[in-house]
Amino acid sequence: MVLSYTETKVEVKQESATLLREYQRSPSARIRNEIVELNYGLVRKEAHYWTNQCTESYDDLLQVGCIGLIRAIERFELSKGIAFSSFAIPYIRGEIQHYLRDKGVMVRIPRRWLALQQQAVGVSRNLREKYNRQPTDAEVAAALDISAVEWQEIKLAWTNRSPLSLDTPNQEGDDDSGSLADTVPDRQYSSFQLAQEDRIRLQDALVQLEQRTHEVLKFVFFYDLTQKEVAEHLGISVVTVSRRLKQGLASLKQLMLVPEE
């Protein structure tokens, strides 16, 4: 007997609920892994979406998404009556987004340019075989059916897609040449120090907030969820999310005030 998609989905949901109930009673790696395997489709769906938005590999995004799924399993509460899939997706998506912010391309490149850059790899290889030399930019642009100016812009965007480390030496092969950080004016370094201090104060202030308010701020500002999505995720009303968001920001402002000496 072949089950329909709907019947299969219902079976997965029921089996997940049974395993989650068992996991909450007696947590174990075996049960957790079974839950991950059952809900792996949620990770695949998110990873597939984000693969088209960045240059990171699908396999890497799958691994990162699974971390988000495991975190959702650890924090899920059956008593709230929320579907596990609805609860888990923000964690999976948030984990992938955090990974892309920390590890991925820092400068956003239009999807069309990314596609052309990938296409240019094969085009350049074919032209090298055809002419037995490195193709010119004009030849590559013509093969891609774009202007030479646009091809130059794509190359520049691809080259500068990630920020350059301040530890990079000014001149390659010269140990005494110093790094790019040495060329940064002191006022910029002071601004960096202030930014780091602000970040530390923000982290300290966040942990002082009431747990639910902390969660609302985290999902809105760290995971980029809408207030409606946060409400559905936490099982509260949009009005409550809005109120806690306003209260949380006011509390953070007070907690982060630097006392006058």
Image (spheres, helix red, strand yellow):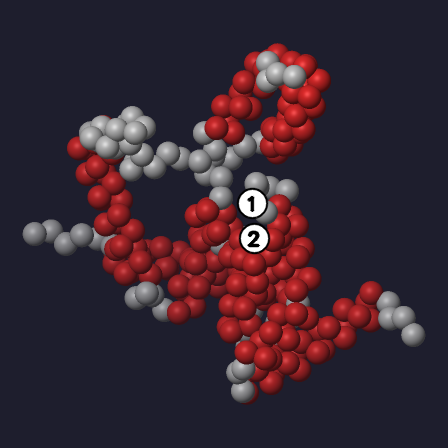
Extreme residue in the bottom direction: 25
In the picture shown, does residue 259 fall above or below 29? Answer: above
Q: Is residue 97 visible?
A: yes
Q: Residues within 10 Å of mark 1 (few under 14, many from 20)?
A: some
Identify the residue position indicated by label 1 in the image: 56
The residue furthest front is: 132
Callout 2, which amino acid?
A: Asp
Q: Position of residue 177 (x, y in %)?
A: 22, 28
Q: What residue appears at the point 7 percent right and 52 percent down from the top-left corner? A: 261
Residue at x 62% of width, y 50% of height? 58
> Front-most of 184 and 192?
184
Q: Residues within 10 Å of mark 2 (few under 14, many from 20)?
A: few
Q: Residue at x 31, y 34 (%)?
A: 168
Q: Check the picture and name the quadrant holding the N terminus.
A: bottom right
Q: Which mark is residue 60?
A: 2
Q: Secondary structure at mark 1?
A: loop
